Image (spheres, coloured by chain):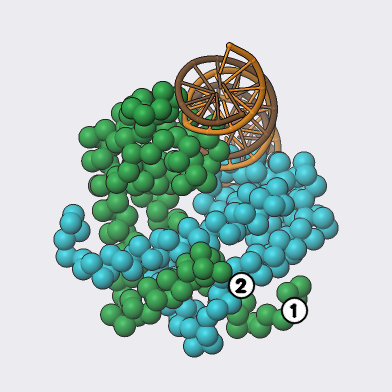
Chain colours: A green, B cyan, C orange, D brown
DNA sequence: TGACTTGGTTTGCGATGCGTACTACTGCGA
DNA sequence: TCGCAGTAGTACGCATCGCAAACCAAGTCA
């Protein structure tokens, strides 16, 4: 083993985590595709549900280059999901906001994803739900925290 | 709530799961990118580590169209990671196999991913490792099992 | 005012993935 | 043995996606 000091037990945890992530992303991707959306588009709409950011801020949130945003927002705008509004405080700036159609799609999509992912966890007991949330929180924390 | 019969507690489990999957995929994607590979390429190499499938079988494993495989394998071949071998039993068929360079990259990449994902779980106790594997297994099972 | 910064767009490039059409080989029945 | 439906792959055209570099216009600051 290249990472010689990691036990087999830990390796298999890694494996479980990776497989799980592919499972979840697969479901998300499939649901998104049913609405002719990519995962990035979904995330875009999700962000816009409670914010009205500029292009640069969006790029930061999505981990994309600003030049990629132009296209992403442009395509979403062409589909009538999103609108560009000139910033009232900065003549260069643009604020991106959901259209009613975009909001509707965002909400429907989110509900559907909740449902479909929820189906995965349907067989878990209440205690297992708690466990899972706890573990996820701990893993997610480890990133921000240290 | 559209999915009205799902409790808030369950909703937040879904959220945890989704966030976790993005976290893991993000790490994987970053490691892959450091080697100029996409996640699909990594999966391709991983499959080839212990198999020598045809294009169609590969497409099934990766959930891609067969026409997408031509390009994927073609690019990998151009980079010297993979080789196409005419099938000995089927004149139409092609077997895809790792070159030594491809195998080397696949192994190094896998080790690195194990390590990087392992860093996420480093703070978990032994008991939590067991929990996590158990939960993942249960979720993954639910898919195949029904 | 002039230099620099900053928010966005444009352009060009390559990767990715799909659908369709096409080629070549297989297997099978008459 | 011939002929034909089915199968494995490829080629092509299209759209999305993401990056990098060049560029533009509006703000900032000395």
Q: Is residue A146 left or right of residue A119?
A: right
CA distance for labels 1 and 2:
12 Å
Quarter of image, res B101: bottom right
Q: Nearer the viewer, residue A90 or D6?
A: A90
A41 shown above or below A145: above
Name the image quarter holding the N terminus of chain B: bottom left
Spot occupied by residue A48 in the image (x, y as percentages of width and height): 33, 42
Q: Residue furthest right?
A: B100
Chain where mark 2 sits: B
A76 shown above or below B89: above
Chain where mark 1 sits: A
Q: Nearer the viewer, residue B25 or A123?
A: B25
User: Is residue A58 in view?
Assistant: yes
Q: Mark 1 — residue?
A: A4
User: Is residue B49 in view?
Assistant: no
Residue at x 37% of width, y 73% of height: A133
Tell me the tag on residue B118. 2
SS at mark 1?
loop
């Amino acid at each position: 083993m290249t990472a010689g000091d990691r036990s087999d037990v830990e390796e298999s945890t890694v494996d479980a985590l990776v497989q799980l992530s592919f499972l979840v992303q697969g479901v998300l991707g499939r649901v998104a595709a049913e609405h002719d959306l990519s995962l990035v588009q979904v995330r875009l709409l999700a962000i816009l549900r409670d914010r009205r950011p500029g292009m640069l801020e969006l790029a930061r949130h999505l981990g994309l280059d600003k030049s990629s945003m132009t296209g992403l927002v442009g395509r979403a705008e062409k589909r009538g999901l999103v609108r560009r509004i000139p910033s009232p405080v900065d003549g260069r700036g643009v604020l991106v906001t959901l259209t009613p159609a975009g909001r509707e799609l965002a909400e429907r999509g989110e509900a559907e994803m909740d449902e479909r992912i929820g189906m995965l966890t349907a067989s878990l007991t209440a205690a297992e739900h708690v466990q899972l949330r706890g573990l996820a929180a701990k893993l997610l924390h480890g990133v921000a925290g240290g």
